[in-house]
């Protein structure tokens, strides 16, 4: 199996690493990278049953992640901020936000572009 061959090749390269060229070092880096990815997918497990469990759990995680992302994308919740609360946020971003019904606050949705625009540069949040 490819995993075992690459694993043995990595072991051989690690033994040679101290006295070898940079090309062997690069190859070792690539081998380590792929073996780490495969290990994360359960290929290092000896038991087929354990590998199946890892695959099932990874599939469930992927499904839950997709459901979570869909829920976030469908969420229409908003927060209202005064201009003082948006201190430090670029003026172009603040002017692009909609005003609430009273007109004294700006409405920010919970979608990533708006929340990141507010949270990363907001002086009030940084003080807290």
Image: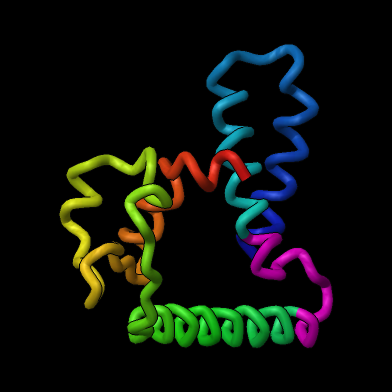
Residue 77, percent across and down?
38, 81
Vertical placement of residue 29 versus 5, above or below: above
Start-end of magenta stretch: 38-50
Vertical placement of residue 117 versus 3, above or below: above
Vertical placement of residue 124 versus 82, above or below: above
Residue 122, percent across and down?
43, 44
Give me the residue at 60% from left, 34% from top: 29
Residue 80 or 78: which is nearer the viewer?
80
Give me the residue at 36% from left, 75% from top: 78
Residue 95 or 1: which is nearer the viewer?
95
Residue 24, percent across and down?
60, 24
Give me the residue at 65% from left, 87% from top: 56
37 with respect to 4 (left or right)? left
Give me the residue at 22% from left, 42% from top: 91
Residue 99, percent across and down?
21, 67
Q: Quadrant of the C terminus?
A: top right
Residue 107 falls in which quadrant of the image? bottom left
Residue 51 falls in which quadrant of the image? bottom right
């Amino acid at each position: 199996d490819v995993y075992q061959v690459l694993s043995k090749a990595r072991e051989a390269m690690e033994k040679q690493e101290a006295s070898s060229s940079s090309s062997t070092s690069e190859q070792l880096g690539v081998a380590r990278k792929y073996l780490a990815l495969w290990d994360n997918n359960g290929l290092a497990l000896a038991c087929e049953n354990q590998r199946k469990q890892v695959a099932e759990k990874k599939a469930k995680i992927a499904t839950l992640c997709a459901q979570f992302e869909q829920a976030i994308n469908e969420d229409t919740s908003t927060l209202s901020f005064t201009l003082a609360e948006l201190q430090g946020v670029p003026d172009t971003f603040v002017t692009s936000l909609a005003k609430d019904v009273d007109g004294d606050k700006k409405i920010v949705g919970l979608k990533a572009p708006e929340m990141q625009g507010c949270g990363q540069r907001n002086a009030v949040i940084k003080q807290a």
